[in-house]
Amino acid sequence: MESWIKTRNKIIGWNYRNILKPILFKFDPEDIHDLFIKVGNLLGQTSATRYLTRVLFDYENPVLEQEILGIKFKNPVGLSAGFDKNARLTKILPAVGFGFAEAGSVTGRPCKGNEGRHLWRLPKSKSLIVYYGLTNDGAEAIARRLLEVQLQVSPKLDFEQEAKGPEVGLRAHLKSNFLHKSNFVLGISLAKTNDQKTITTEAGTADYIKAYEAFLKTDVGDYFTINISCPNTFGGEPFVEPERLDLLLSAFAKIRDEESARGLPSVKAKEVQLQVSPKLDFVSVNRPLFIKLPPDLSEEKLDAIIELVKKYKINGFVSTNLTKDRNNPLIKDKIKDPLPTDKGGLSGKIVEELATKQIEYIYKKIKDLPQTERPIIIGCGGIFTAQDAYNKIKAGASLLQLITGMIFEGPQVISEINQGLVTLLQKDGYKNISEAVGKSTCQP
Ligand SMILES: Cc1cc2nc3c(=O)[nH]c(=O)nc-3n(C[C@H](O)[C@H](O)[C@H](O)COP(=O)(O)O)c2cc1C
């Protein structure tokens, strides 16, 4: 089985890199992105196309399974925020081999994003310049879309079962849908609407919370990420400033604590919600909160953010988002397009080392906390191979995310990374991926 998967990946990868990619890279990157969303959405619609996709791309191995913050991950490789902005791919992503995905970033109100072009390829640097500015349909529409996907698969809700208690009713119902059957974890990335109306700290915070509440009400999303690091928004990244972040995290923590006291909406309430009644009744649970950081933070700011994460019991970091630094010596392409040099963020190989260094830095600061209080790190930036992924795990990441590696190497890269990780872990004598977390950072 292992050698068949290796051969399968080699064939698909060769075809992608030598035939499909040269064609795709002749067209505008945003048009190709939109095309992939349409194709992915279509492939997700029938069980036959989902099955075929699974045969071509999936890989499973117990060495990669982890339980983190009460959530089971079948493997550590996730789709990073920004690819599936409007949550159109949730039906197909489990079959492509991802262990989890982050939809969004989603904002309080629908958001058109920045004027003009949004995406440029830097082929020599294996990077993208991203200038979307949080284009998305808005939290309410996306939460509703995800709720419909969840209910679509098993639309017949068992209210008698529900009467026997939440474990039997709601949980059983959730487990019966395809996302939970395939152990697929869905995170939601939350941001503030990119316009002038959210410029003050109060209005910005209210917009984040509006997005958060839309998902809490509909009970979709297994975890949430507070994205404070979008480099492309009106007014910059105000919430990387510790005083403002303190207010933002305190607002999130308040809602989270209220939610956990009150709990999840019941199955019946979900159906009512579909008929657009906002009134929900609740049972009980708590979903983790992460914070997504830029790679360009000073140590002083990062220290202050780590302290705030501890103060408000935020469950972890996504490290990192795009870099804004256009003087990075790894940029090998001449940027011809007239995009102002102070706009847009860079992904891929340009951000890889910055992200790995930040992971190491954070891990050193948190590794001595008791396990129950230790934040989890999701490592992201420039992961193209199993070795890149392993470097981030050994630096301190428990989970990983990527986008650019998939665009440059092909969709089989997820399976290649997972299979390659198993080989690297076994070579170092680890029985499970969790044993390797932070191992290079902890070396004396
Ligand atoms: C096309 C594109 C859109 C992105 N949009 C978002 C976004 O909406 N929210 C976010 O938190 N990160 C966004 N990002 C950043 C990625 O999630 C990720 O942090 C970054 O690209 C580094 O990972 P990579 O090198 O594997 O692409 C985007 C990246 C790309 C390439």
Image (spheres, helix red, strand yellow):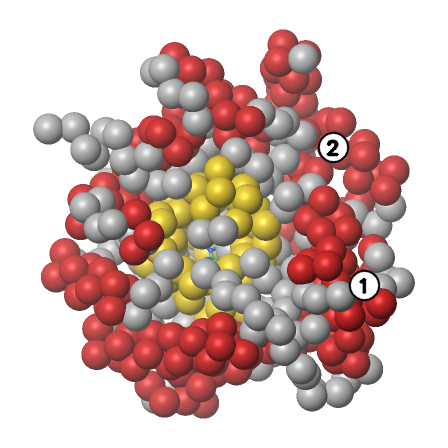
Secondary structure type for disc 2: helix
What residue lies at 45% left-to-right and 61% top-to-bottom? 288
Task: Write down the quadrant of residue 424 in the picture.
Answer: top left
Q: Nearer the viewer, residue 26 or 101?
A: 101
* Residue at image mark 1: 161
* Residue at image mark 2: 54
Secondary structure type for disc 1: helix
Residue 43, x across and y down, in percent: 80, 44
Q: What mark, if any, has residue 29 been given in the picture?
A: none
Task: Write down the quadrant of residue 425 in the picture.
Answer: top left
Name above or below for residue 244 compared with residue 39.
below
Ligand 1 under 8 Å from disc 2 Cβ: no
Decide: few, some or many residues near mark 1? Use Cα within 10 Å; few <14, some 14-19, many ≥20: some
Which amino acid is tagged 1? Gln
Residue 173, x across and y down, in percent: 76, 58
What residue lies at 22% left-to-right and 50% top-to-bottom? 369
Which amino acid is tagged 2? Arg
Residue 305, x across and y down, in percent: 23, 64
Name the side, left or right, on which 81 lies relative to 175. left
Q: Nearer the viewer, residue 307 or 29?
A: 307
Quadrant location of the N terminus in the rendered image: top right
What residue lies at 55% left-to-right and 27% top-to-bottom? 62
Name the side, left or right, on which 75 lies relative to 164. left
Give the mark nearest the N terminus, 2 or 1.
2
